[in-house]
Image: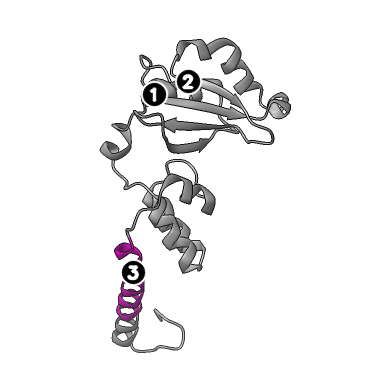
Amino acid sequence: MQLLPGVRNPATAVTMAVAATVVIFIASMPLAWSKEQLSSRECEDLGFTGLALCSDCHTLAEYIKDQELVTDCLKCCTEDSDDATSKITYSGAVLEVCMRKLVFYPEIVGFIEEEKDQFPSVKVQYIFNSPPKLILLDDEGQHKESIRIDNWKREHILQFLQEKVKRSSAI
Protein backbone atom coordinates (compact mmCIF):
# COMPACT_ATOMS: atom_id res chain seq x y z
CA MET A 1 0.00 0.00 0.00
CA GLN A 2 1.36 3.41 -0.95
CA LEU A 3 0.80 6.35 1.38
CA LEU A 4 1.92 8.93 -1.15
CA PRO A 5 1.88 8.39 -4.92
CA GLY A 6 5.36 7.73 -6.26
CA VAL A 7 6.85 7.02 -2.80
CA ARG A 8 7.44 3.34 -2.23
CA ASN A 9 9.18 3.43 1.15
CA PRO A 10 6.64 3.89 4.03
CA ALA A 11 9.28 5.57 6.23
CA THR A 12 9.94 8.17 3.53
CA ALA A 13 6.20 8.79 3.15
CA VAL A 14 5.77 9.32 6.89
CA THR A 15 8.78 11.66 6.98
CA MET A 16 7.35 13.68 4.09
CA ALA A 17 3.94 13.91 5.77
CA VAL A 18 5.51 15.10 9.04
CA ALA A 19 7.64 17.63 7.16
CA ALA A 20 4.57 18.97 5.35
CA THR A 21 2.71 19.31 8.65
CA VAL A 22 5.62 21.22 10.19
CA VAL A 23 5.80 23.56 7.18
CA ILE A 24 2.05 24.28 7.41
CA PHE A 25 2.34 24.89 11.16
CA ILE A 26 5.30 27.25 10.78
CA ALA A 27 3.60 29.08 7.90
CA SER A 28 0.53 29.70 10.05
CA MET A 29 2.53 31.07 13.00
CA PRO A 30 2.46 34.68 11.74
CA LEU A 31 -1.35 34.44 11.84
CA ALA A 32 -1.23 33.70 15.55
CA TRP A 33 1.34 36.41 16.21
CA SER A 34 -0.54 39.16 14.36
CA LYS A 35 -3.15 39.68 17.07
CA GLU A 36 -3.25 43.44 16.65
CA GLN A 37 -6.91 44.40 17.00
CA LEU A 38 -8.63 46.87 14.68
CA SER A 39 -11.53 49.10 15.67
CA SER A 40 -15.03 47.95 14.76
CA ARG A 41 -15.27 50.72 12.15
CA GLU A 42 -11.98 49.64 10.53
CA CYS A 43 -13.20 46.04 10.50
CA GLU A 44 -16.51 47.07 8.96
CA ASP A 45 -14.63 49.01 6.27
CA LEU A 46 -12.72 45.81 5.50
CA GLY A 47 -16.00 43.88 5.24
CA PHE A 48 -15.88 42.12 8.61
CA THR A 49 -19.08 42.96 10.43
CA GLY A 50 -20.60 41.35 13.46
CA LEU A 51 -19.01 39.25 16.15
CA ALA A 52 -16.82 36.95 14.05
CA LEU A 53 -15.04 34.21 15.96
CA CYS A 54 -11.36 33.53 15.33
CA SER A 55 -12.19 29.92 14.44
CA ASP A 56 -14.11 31.37 11.47
CA CYS A 57 -10.90 33.06 10.32
CA HIS A 58 -9.00 29.78 10.60
CA THR A 59 -11.70 28.08 8.52
CA LEU A 60 -11.43 30.90 5.99
CA ALA A 61 -7.66 30.29 5.81
CA GLU A 62 -8.31 26.69 4.75
CA TYR A 63 -10.23 27.82 1.67
CA ILE A 64 -8.77 31.23 0.83
CA LYS A 65 -5.06 31.52 0.15
CA ASP A 66 -5.01 35.31 0.55
CA GLN A 67 -2.76 35.76 3.60
CA GLU A 68 -3.62 39.47 3.96
CA LEU A 69 -7.36 38.76 4.06
CA VAL A 70 -6.90 36.09 6.74
CA THR A 71 -4.65 38.41 8.77
CA ASP A 72 -7.28 41.18 8.59
CA CYS A 73 -9.93 38.67 9.70
CA LEU A 74 -7.80 37.72 12.71
CA LYS A 75 -7.41 41.40 13.62
CA CYS A 76 -11.21 41.72 13.74
CA CYS A 77 -12.26 38.48 15.42
CA THR A 78 -13.20 37.52 18.95
CA GLU A 79 -11.50 34.56 20.63
CA ASP A 80 -13.60 31.40 20.70
CA SER A 81 -14.75 31.05 24.24
CA ASP A 82 -18.18 30.86 25.74
CA ASP A 83 -17.07 33.41 28.32
CA ALA A 84 -15.68 35.82 25.72
CA THR A 85 -18.93 36.40 23.86
CA SER A 86 -21.64 35.43 26.31
CA LYS A 87 -20.69 37.98 28.97
CA ILE A 88 -20.50 40.96 26.63
CA THR A 89 -23.46 43.30 27.02
CA TYR A 90 -24.18 46.69 25.53
CA SER A 91 -25.92 49.76 26.92
CA GLY A 92 -28.01 50.29 23.84
CA ALA A 93 -28.44 49.64 20.16
CA VAL A 94 -29.56 51.33 16.99
CA LEU A 95 -31.52 49.30 14.46
CA GLU A 96 -30.47 50.86 11.18
CA VAL A 97 -32.47 50.11 8.03
CA CYS A 98 -33.53 51.73 4.76
CA MET A 99 -37.23 52.58 4.87
CA ARG A 100 -37.62 51.79 1.16
CA LYS A 101 -36.17 48.28 1.66
CA LEU A 102 -38.34 47.43 4.67
CA VAL A 103 -40.88 45.74 2.42
CA PHE A 104 -38.26 43.03 1.79
CA TYR A 105 -37.79 42.36 5.53
CA PRO A 106 -41.16 41.43 7.07
CA GLU A 107 -39.49 39.95 10.18
CA ILE A 108 -37.78 43.27 10.91
CA VAL A 109 -41.01 45.18 10.25
CA GLY A 110 -42.81 42.86 12.71
CA PHE A 111 -40.13 43.47 15.33
CA ILE A 112 -40.29 47.26 14.89
CA GLU A 113 -44.09 47.38 15.00
CA GLU A 114 -44.77 44.84 17.76
CA GLU A 115 -41.65 44.15 19.86
CA LYS A 116 -39.40 47.20 19.80
CA ASP A 117 -41.19 48.92 22.70
CA GLN A 118 -39.88 46.19 25.05
CA PHE A 119 -36.40 47.68 24.54
CA PRO A 120 -36.25 51.38 25.50
CA SER A 121 -32.50 51.43 24.85
CA VAL A 122 -33.00 50.38 21.20
CA LYS A 123 -33.68 53.12 18.67
CA VAL A 124 -34.68 52.73 15.02
CA GLN A 125 -32.81 54.85 12.51
CA TYR A 126 -33.83 55.03 8.86
CA ILE A 127 -30.78 55.51 6.63
CA PHE A 128 -31.11 55.52 2.85
CA ASN A 129 -29.79 52.33 1.22
CA SER A 130 -28.59 50.86 4.53
CA PRO A 131 -28.88 47.09 4.93
CA PRO A 132 -30.65 46.06 8.15
CA LYS A 133 -28.14 46.01 10.99
CA LEU A 134 -27.86 46.43 14.72
CA ILE A 135 -25.28 48.94 15.87
CA LEU A 136 -24.36 48.08 19.44
CA LEU A 137 -23.40 50.92 21.77
CA ASP A 138 -21.20 51.18 24.86
CA ASP A 139 -21.98 53.12 28.06
CA GLU A 140 -21.04 56.43 26.38
CA GLY A 141 -23.33 55.74 23.42
CA GLN A 142 -20.36 55.07 21.14
CA HIS A 143 -20.47 52.51 18.30
CA LYS A 144 -18.83 49.25 19.50
CA GLU A 145 -20.04 46.53 17.11
CA SER A 146 -22.37 46.22 14.18
CA ILE A 147 -24.20 43.10 13.07
CA ARG A 148 -26.07 42.57 9.82
CA ILE A 149 -29.52 41.12 10.49
CA ASP A 150 -30.85 40.72 6.93
CA ASN A 151 -31.85 37.09 7.41
CA TRP A 152 -32.76 37.10 11.10
CA LYS A 153 -36.20 36.05 12.22
CA ARG A 154 -38.06 38.17 14.76
CA GLU A 155 -37.41 35.66 17.55
CA HIS A 156 -33.66 35.79 16.83
CA ILE A 157 -33.67 39.59 17.12
CA LEU A 158 -35.62 39.35 20.39
CA GLN A 159 -33.32 36.70 21.86
CA PHE A 160 -30.18 38.60 20.86
CA LEU A 161 -31.41 41.88 22.35
CA GLN A 162 -32.58 40.17 25.56
CA GLU A 163 -29.12 38.60 26.02
CA LYS A 164 -26.90 41.45 24.83
CA VAL A 165 -28.60 44.80 25.39
CA LYS A 166 -29.46 46.26 28.79
CA ARG A 167 -33.14 47.22 28.87
CA SER A 168 -33.00 49.83 31.62
CA SER A 169 -30.80 52.49 30.07
CA ALA A 170 -32.06 54.90 27.48
CA ILE A 171 -29.83 56.34 24.79
**Residue 30 circle label:** 3
Look at the numbered disc 3 and give the secondary structure of its residue.
helix
Relative to 29, residue 53 above or below: above
Can you tell which quarter of the image residue 13 is in? bottom left
Q: Nearer the viewer, residue 20 or 101?
A: 101
Q: Do the CB atoms of the residues marked 2 and 1 lie less than 8 Å apart? A: yes
Residue at horizontal 56 percent and vertical 25 percent from the top: 153
Q: Which residues are magenta?
A: 17-34
Disc 2, SS:
strand
Going 44% across and 31% down the picture, which residue do you hit? 136
Along the viewing direction, whichever of 41 and 131 lies nearer the viewer: 41
Give the answer, above or below, for where 66 lies relative to 157. Answer: below
Q: Position of residue 104 (x, y in %)?
A: 71, 28
Residue type at tag 1: Val
Q: Main secondary structure of the magenta part?
A: helix
| Circle 1: element type | loop
The residue tagged 1 is: 165
Q: Amino acid at mark 2?
A: Val
Colour mode? one colour
Dot 3 and dot 2 residues touching (CB under 8 Å)? no
